[in-house]
Amino acid sequence: MEFGTKYGILVKYMENMGSALVAFSGGVDSSLLLAAALDALGRESVLAVTADSVIHPPEDLEVARKTAEHLGSPWQVVLSAEMDDPAFVANPPHRCYYCKRGLLGLLAEVAEKNKLQCIVEGSNRDDLKDIRPGFRAVREAGVLSPLLEVGMSKGDVREAARAIGIPNWNRPSDACLCSRVPYGVAITPQILNRIYKAEVVIRGLGVGTVRVRDHGDIARLEVQARDIDLICRGENRDTIAENLTRLGYRYVAVDITGYRTGSMNE
C-alpha cells in the first residue's frame, strides 16, 4: 500500500471522531497524527496539548510549538506533575505507566473543559515490539491510537510525514530522560538535569543520537556505532571527560555495543 494511501486511511479513520485532543510531543508520530486530525476534523475541532516537564529536554517544548504553528493547529501547554507521584519517582520497571496515567488524567480535564469528544495519542505498530508499560494506561483511559489502529509502522509514519511536508519528519526518536536512569534509583530533577547537560555536550560534537546512562558516578555513553570513534578522538574525548566530570561523574565509559533502544531493560 502506498504511503499516501495510508495517510488517507488515517484521515478517513479519524473523520467520525467529531473533535479531538491530540497528545502532542512534537515528535514525528504525534505530528503526523495532528496533521491527520486537522485534515479530518478541521482546525476548530482539534486541540494539540503538550506536557511541560523536567523529564523532557526543554527544547522539546519549542519544537512542539513550532510544529503546531506550522500545521496551523491550536496548541496548549499543561504542566505535568509526575514528580509529585511517589510511585513514579521510585522508578520501578513500570514507571512509564504512572507517568502516562497522570498525564492522561490532565488531558482528560482539558478535553472536558474544551468539550472535545476524543483523546488521541501517537503510538505506532513498531512501539508494540518494545516494553511499553505506558500503553496500559492508554488503554485504561480509553484513549485512541489511530496510527496503531490503521497499522502504520515508524517507517510509514516518517514517509507519510515527509510526503505531506512536516518539517520534523526525520527527527530522531527520543525517550524521556528518565529512561537513562536504572530502575530502582529514585528520579530527581538534579539527576535528569545532569543527564540533559551531558547529552548537550556530546551532541555539540556532531553526534546525532546519544544516551547518557546514569549509573551513579559512572556515565555510560551510548552512541551509534559509527560515532564511537568520533567521541573517542583526542580533543573530543577530553571535552567529554572534562565536562562530564564537572557535572559530577567520576568515570565516563563508552558502551562499545553502541546505542540501542531500551538498553535499561536488558
Image (cartoon, rainbow, N blue to C red):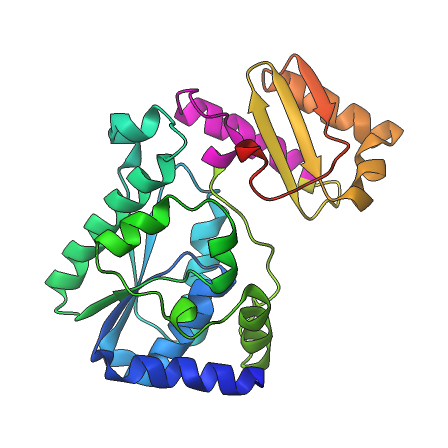
Along the line of sight, the residue nearer the viewer: 165 or 146: 146
Say if the magenta span includes residue 21: no
Report the span colored magenta.
Answer: 178-202
Residue 27 higher or lower than 227, as above or below:
below
Residue 119 horizontal/vertical position (percent): 25, 64
Residue at 62% in and 64% down: 170
Residue 42 seen: no
| For residue 238, side relative to residue 93 (left or right) | right
Residue 221 found in image quarter: top right
Q: Is residue 186 magenta?
A: yes
Residue 28 seen: yes
At 53% from the left edge and 67% from the top edge, which residue is drawn? 153
Residue placed at 49% from the left, 82% from the top? 6
Residue 32 vertical placement versus 134 (above, below): below
Q: Quick check: 217 above or below 149?
A: above
Q: Position of residue 187 (x, y in %)?
A: 40, 25
Q: Is residue 15 left or right of residue 237?
A: left
Q: Quadrant of the C terminus?
A: top right
User: Is 6 left, or right, of 97 in this rendering?
Assistant: right
Snapshot quadrant of residue 148: bottom left
Total tally of numbered discs in the picture = 0
Left or right of 204: which side holds 36?
left
Please name whichever residue, 59 or 166, is drawn nearer the observer in this view of the structure.
Answer: 166
The percent coordinates of residue 233 (x first, y second) are: 87, 32
Above/below status of 234 relative to 63:
above
Q: Residue placed at 42% from the left, 52% from the top? A: 61
Q: Quadrant of the N terminus?
A: bottom right
The quarter of the displayed image where residue 244 is located:
top right
- Image location (x, y in percent) of residue 52: 35, 46
- Examine the residues drawn in magenta and state their main secondary structure: helix
Residue placed most toward the observer, 110 or 266 = 266
